[in-house]
Image (tube, rainbow, N blue to C red):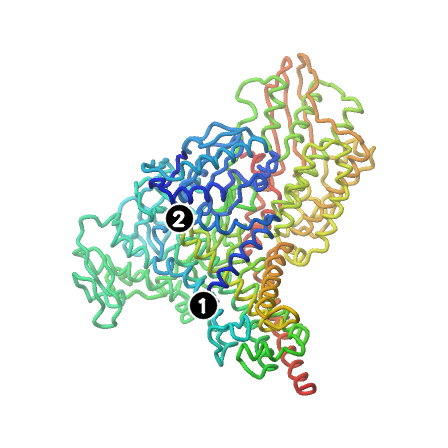
Amino acid sequence: MIVGARQGKLSGLRQLVAKAMARELTGFLVPGLDIAHAWGLDVEAAGVRLVASPRHASVLLVVGDISPALRNAAAVIYAQMARPRALLVLGTDDLSPLPSADVTAELSQHGLIDGIAQLRIAFAEGAFRPEVADFDAPMLHVRVEYTCPMHPEVVQDEPGSCPKCGMTLEPREVSANDVDTHPHETHDHHNESHGHQHESHDHPHEAHGHHHETHSHQHQAHEHQPVDQGASVEYTCPMHPEVVQDEPGSCPKCGMTLEPRKAQNSQAHAHASLDHSEMDHGDMDHSEMDHGGMDHGEMDHSGMDHGDHAFMSMIDVTKDLPRSSDGLPMDWIDVPFGPFFPGLPSGLLLTLTLDGDTVAGSSARTLAENVALLHHSALEPHSFVARLSNLEPLAPLAYRLLACQAMENAAGIKTTAVAAHGRVGALERERITSHLGWLALFGQQMGFDWLLRRAASLQLKFQHANYQQIMALKPDIVSLIKRLRRTPLLKSRNAGIGRLAQDNVLRGPVARAVGINNDARSTNPVYTSLGFKAISRDSGDSLARLQVRLDEISQSLALIDATGAIEPPEPANIGSATGAGEALVETPRGAAHLQLTLENGRVVTAQLETPSTRHLTLIDALIEQQSLGDALLAVGSLDLSPWEIRQ
Amino acid sequence: MTTALILLLLAVGAYLVAVIEAWTTSGRWRLTAPITAGIALLGRESIVPRKSDRVFFEVAPVLLLISALIAATVLPLTPDLIITDLATGALFINAALVYVLVALLMAGWGPDGAYAMIGGWRFLGQLIAYAMLIVMPVTAVAMRAESLLTTQIVASQADLWNILYQPLGFVLFFVAAMALAFLPPFDLTTANSELAGGVEAEYSGVRLAVFRLGRLVLVITLATTTVVFYLGGWQGPWLPPWAWSAIKILAVTALMLLAGRALPRIREADLLNLCWKLGIPLALLNIFVVGLLILVWP
């Protein structure tokens, strides 16, 4: 049995269909492929084909503990999935507001394979049920608000007219709670809170300004009537407002189909606006071309009584629309990318204001934010180290090392040379793993399937490899890099994209790709004794970042070769030391800095600075006026980790 | 009778394309996968987004399938196995395939979703890039055959296949055909990692099944067109004509599906640049060279 079964009796034919579904499971991954790889999971090898759109998925696969904001976003994804749909959860039991999991398993490849086997059985037996439950969650609820088609900043809860132009405000639906938690298609959620059981599910959100005017009119008139309940409906021609009749039909003057509207006494006033908003979208460019030479600002619009005129000038209609860089007014739409968008770091919510295919503005934030470092209480060294390494699933060892070093510095303990070498080996192995994980994600983003698969499979091999295994994998890395150098289109896809100037915000490979020699390893005596020299490039674009990371993979291999050992850091026994200390570790994404104070052997204060927190602020300037594909690639090339971002 | 046979062959072809496509993405041969995947899709809900433009949303997948089918009617698999040997066959293929654009635009506009809409408009941009590179190489092919009859075009390659006679035209046509079928690296309109499926993103259940079937038939139709125009159609030694057609079509299909896996997706601006600044001059050169060849070596 599965919770999200489709309604129907499991008859003979449906049994066959259910068996086919059980064989062909398609999955939507929460929080994302990068995290699944970091946990050592290979979902496709386990038999679930991953898809990019929740509509195409039959399984929602949740991997590991995720923040409440991500769970809310996952609930919206779940609501968009077509029935029958199932929920497979690995390694966490806190799911609210998602429904209870159909199958839970432990967080490992073995658990995944087990879980999928159980899920296939559940699907074959329970894909159809005579009675099905609706899925409801607070974030799926909507409320209606009213906004002016021409002045998006005018928003109110009651119907009325716009204080700026007098046009009637149009209803639109927005989420009943926080709009920002919508991960995927804000305007178009599969919503079952209305209790519909028929095939055409409702999708209540239109939180962005993407108007298909004609549809919404039909919609208002025929199915939904969010505001017009009780009012009688009359029909009028969009071009000839004087034509009004009670029955549907066509206009006697121009033959157009009459449009329904609610009858009102002050009708000319109320409805002229609807008609215009419909007309203006097609003609906007036009008006701009015809009247481009006129100085609109100087014209006295306030003297015109828009509301009472049946005709409204196109200049008026478009004058407040935002202008693209080419001067043409277009409808701008806000489109969410994330937090589970394929190819972007999972947990990152990127909202792009799109002007056609061009990014006119953006906002980026993380929904993956982890718990505070200290819960207002002192922590034992071991639990502090564990907390810090759990903070960042994409680079747990680096943060573990950071915590250990800061505590040792605070307690005044020196590590042995052997241990220090082992730590270098472990950190460099993690750098290789992390860079390969980024390569896989970057390959996915570029639609470069081979790179996605190759890098991911190498990443899984490197994850827990010992010294000998790593040396045996060296030829694979060499051939991967060689192949990438020869790949056509790769250079032209990345050259000049996401170009950054030298800036002291930058850290890690992003900084080294603009020629800033910022590498915490350069000042570390163990590294200098191994002959370490930071790699840098100077073009500062996506291509340079790719090259720096590829070079660093080779460099890390050489460093591991030189140290000859891999020893994950263990917290030293600090006894009941008291003092302050700090540490700086070059994580795969750049230098992270931790400052802490110890009191009687317990951590009482801690302050963490991470590279991704800094890099998040770059996004807006980086992608403005870029085309959508380039903008996403530029964000991807930064290798942000939403998990380590401290807001 | 011929019509039924060709429809059956197209169905088999679509099935084989699906098998090959599954192999290119997973590296495994699973002969039952297209069938079980199809059944699974049919058993799932087919959601209609609430504010959709219902007509566009419903018509788009069907139109995609139909336009690919109609183009296939003028393609000969053997000298006799052709639904209608139109006097304007080579042009007719073009005319039929234009509806692919219409279908994708409708699929983009229909569901009232941002990803789909951007995907639809992107394909319009893509058309501007590939359209000339379909028509101009076909012109050179028709010049050599001195006919637009597709059977005549195959017959004209009896001595030397067009892939050798006009290799440049073949490369241009092949690339343009891949762009027309929105196969990677030209999958700007469905880009998973940019538009979460784009024009396909909002379709589910039976409508998605029709959409995917339309895409498969489109790929097989374009592969057949390539074979007819450049690889000598049914011609070949030892084996019967239908076998040669089948082998060549499947080989071209596999090549089309494999090429994109080893490449990153092309940028829209780069695609337009390449097609206009490089592709069209090369296509003109191709027409000129073929013209010369026809004159000096009739």
Q: Which quadrant of the rendered structure holds the N terminus of chain A? A: top left
Could you tell me which chain the residue with mark 1 belongs to?
B
Amino acid type of the residue that numbered disc 1 sits on in the rendered structure: Tyr
Q: Tell which of A381 and B51 is nearer to you.
A: B51
Q: In this view, does A425 lie to the left or right of A434?
A: right
Q: Which residue is drawn at 67% across and 79% down?
A: B159
Q: In which quarter of the image is residue A564?
A: top right
For residue A503, above or below residue B132: above
Does A193 appear above or below A209? above
Q: Is residue B4 left or right of residue A109?
A: left
- Asked if the residue at tag 2 contacts the one at tag 1, i.e. Cβ–Cβ closer than 8 Å, the answer is no
Q: In this view, does B275 lie to the left or right of A298?
A: right
Which residue in the structure is indicated by mark 1?
A: B99
Residue at 45% over, 42% down: A19
Q: What chain does badge 2 belong to?
A: A
Judge whether B285 appears above or below A129 on screen. Answer: below
Helix, strand or loop status at disc 2:
loop
Q: Residue at position x 57%, y 36% from top?
A: A645
x and y percentages locating residue B187 in the rendered image: 55, 58
Give how far across and how far down residue A541 sits, in percent.
66, 52
Dot label at residue A36 = none
